[in-house]
Amino acid sequence: MAFKISTTTVITDDPAGADPVGVVNGTHNNFHPLLDSPTDLVIEFSKPVAYKQLTNGAFYNASSFSFDGAQLRDGRVTYYLLDRNGATIAPGAIPVTSWANGIEPVWSAFNYWQLVFTYYASPAAIRGIAAGFTT
């Protein structure tokens, strides 16, 4: 059974499918995101997964990390795998609007962190959740 909108067929009886408006193209054969290893401390929502090892003995404060403002789109999510590597991270160093349960992680509690950031457009907010682990 074909489906129409007004007089235009949008779904045909063709079991192979059809592209009545000419917009479906390309192939999907690799759904694995690429792991990014940034050289700076800019967290980018255009990169779904990133790994960053901090410098041993360094101190990171509120102006150390940032988000790439050009990449902010409603609903975007990025995973950030952080190896603290013995570095000190001050409270507020990662500038999210809010952390899960309203509590910023105690960075010194773990050396390794899996961080997930989600951007919301209205009102503009970056929300984060953090899971620390030992190995």
Image (spheres, helix red, strand yellow):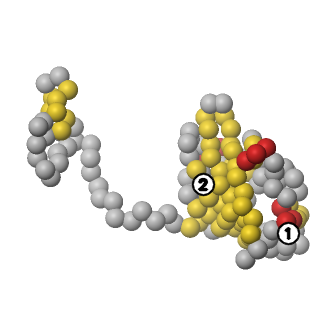
In the image, 81 versus 36, the foreground residue is 81
Separation of disc 2 and disc 1 at Cα? 22 Å
Mark 2 crowdedness (10 Å alpha carbons): few <14, some 14-19, many ≥20 = some
Left or right side of 29 for 4: left
In the picture, the quarter occupied by the C terminus is bottom right
Question: Which of the marked residues, 2 or 1, is nearer the chain's N terminus?
Answer: 2
- Residue at 62% in and 43% down: 119
On the image, the x and y values in percent for residue 23 come to 27, 43
> Which residue position is annotated with label 1?
87
Mark 1 crowdedness (10 Å alpha carbons): few <14, some 14-19, many ≥20 = some
Q: Secondary structure at mark 2?
A: strand
Residue at the far bottom in the pictured view? 135
Q: Which mark is residue 78?
A: 2
Q: How many marks?
A: 2
Left or right side of 45 for 115: right
In the picture, the quarter occupied by the N terminus is top left
Three-letter amino acid code at the position of disc 1: Ala
Note whether 43 is above or below 2 in the view shown.
below
On the image, the x and y values in percent for residue 63 come to 83, 51
On the image, the x and y values in percent for residue 50 come to 62, 63
Is residue 8 in view? yes
Note whether 33 is above or below 93 in the view shown.
below
Left or right side of 57 for 124: left
- Residue at 55% in and 52% down: 46
Q: Secondary structure at mark 1?
A: loop
Q: Which mark is residue 54?
A: none
Three-letter amino acid code at the position of disc 2: Thr
- Residue at 33% in and 60% down: 28
- Residue at 72% in and 57% down: 130
On the image, the x and y values in percent for residue 67 come to 69, 49
